[in-house]
Image (cartoon, rainbow, N blue to C red):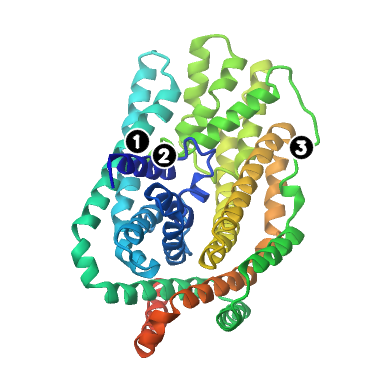
Amino acid sequence: MDITDYFLLSILYFWASSTALSFGVGYYTVYRPVLAGYLTGLILGEPYVGMTAGAVVNIIYIDFVSTGGSLKGDQCLTAIIAALAAVLFKLSPVEASAAAYPFGFFGILIWKYRLKINSVFVKMYENKFKVGNNPDIGIYDGLFPQILLYVMSTAVILAAVFVMILFKEFIFNIKNALFLAGLFLVLSSTWTILYKIGSKKSILIFAAAILITFLTNPNSYIVFLIVAGIILMLANKRLLSDNKKIKAYGIINKKDLIYSWFVWMNFSHSCYSYDRLQGMAFAHSMKNIFKKLYTSNGEIAEAIHRHSEGFNTEPNMGTPIHGYIISLEELKSKNNNEDNIMFIKKGMMGIAAGLGDSYTQVVLTPIFISMSIMLCLDNKFTVSLVPIIILALTILNISYTGFMKGYYEGRESLIERINIVKSSRIKTYFPYIFAGILGVSLGKLLILISVDVSKNLTIYAAVGIISIVYTMVKVKRSLK
């Protein structure tokens, strides 16, 4: 590795950890191990080796859901280090994943300390506003937090790579132990997600899928096309359709709405902090709107500051709130009608947050990412990028149409969205679809490592049993 590699890895980790410059979909794409591993491998000259290691890490984190800003581990950093270990040390994907797994706990420090430090930027903004300096919200929500994140990301990735290289000899000496540990992590994660799904049919589908895959090794490309067809038939097109109604007060136009949506998507978590959460980002997204609604710098600064209060929702499913609030602010500027806008905003955010996480994070992301894992483990590397692209486009469509519908159709658009998701057939059949894909993915992985497993079948069978027992004990403790 040379200095260019280190620099590119720091950019990759920063990009994956930030919502900036990714239209808000980086969390669903670049941050996910299967893609982060591929990009790491691309930097190091062996993209497919890196991607395979990332795919195994992704199975370990397959039940990953960030709700309310909580993270169990940094799967992106784990994937980057696993890909690095696979490429530089020639470790198998399972060994590399086990060696990199502890770094996930190291990386989570970024998220926790970032939330604390971002509060400093909030206070700086508040102090500037109090003395009447009309501060630029973009600096305190965008520029400063992103510089901080890059510095922190660079420090963490350099430290992680240094530690990994420092322990190179030790890692070689425990390769067998790493293989066992990696297999344990994969299996325990699989059992955990199946237990969470809690469906006997899903378990049967998973068992059948893994058995059929291991015995017949079907072409995952065909499986992908079948699953994609099923999802297309189950999808509710109304969730992705644009607005039909036209409402205009003569001030805000479509370009203003698009720019406001663009800012929100890129900076929704840029200055995420313990005291304001997404409040600064919401205010940032309203900046260009208020510049159209008011002419006085003081009025603009006051309106922006008003929306910098605490706010938190799922950034894609919750966008009808933004569109609706813009329409209310536009009406207020014409009629001077207070209309309790801030109370309306707070009242809408909670239900959108729970609804969004349960759909984008719990349903859509696992389905498409698991299809990418399946294709990758079957050496369909180029095709394995397709599900990730589809996921990104779907998230963007959900976000954009929600934003526009919120403006043109009002709060009814959020109610409609809630009803659509509640009755979603994809959500209903998710346990069966996901269990089948996961079964095929695990079957492909077993085929990939079958030579190693066959040498010590008894030991690896024991690891499987231990992982089941461990998962049962862990789940029972979590229920107490």
Residue hosting label 3: 243
Relative side of 340 to 107, left or right: right
Q: Are marks 2 and 1 in contact (CB under 8 Å)?
A: yes
161 vs 280, left or right, is: left
Q: Which residue appears at 46% of the width and 37% of the height?
A: 310
What x and y, as percent, mark residue 157? Answer: 30, 47
Residue ID at (38%, 58%): 72
**Amino acid type, mark 1:** Asn
Q: Nearer the viewer, residue 345 or 397?
A: 397
> Cβ–Cβ below 8 Å for labels 2 and 3?
no
Q: Residue at x 59, y 13 (%)?
A: 294
Residue 375 as seen in the image, left or right of residue 278: right
Percent position (x, y) of residue 231? 70, 61
- Sequence-wise, the earlier of marks 3 and 1 is 1
In the rendered image, which quarter contains the C terminus? bottom left
Q: Position of residue 470 (x, y in %)?
A: 37, 79
Q: Which residue, given by chain and number where applicable, does mark 2 sit on? A: 272
**Quadrant in the picture for residue 210:** bottom right
Confirm whether residue 70 shows in the render. Answer: no
Amino acid type assigned to the residue bearing label 2 in the image: Tyr
| Disc ID at residue 255 | none
Query: 74 or 356: which is nearer to us?
Result: 74
Mark 2 → mark 3, Cα distance in angstroms: 30 Å
Q: Secondary structure at mark 2?
A: loop
Instruction: Check disc 1 and report its element: helix, strand or loop.
Output: helix
Q: In the rendered image, which residue does mark 1 sit on?
A: 118
Q: Earlier in the sequence, mark 2 or mark 1?
A: 1
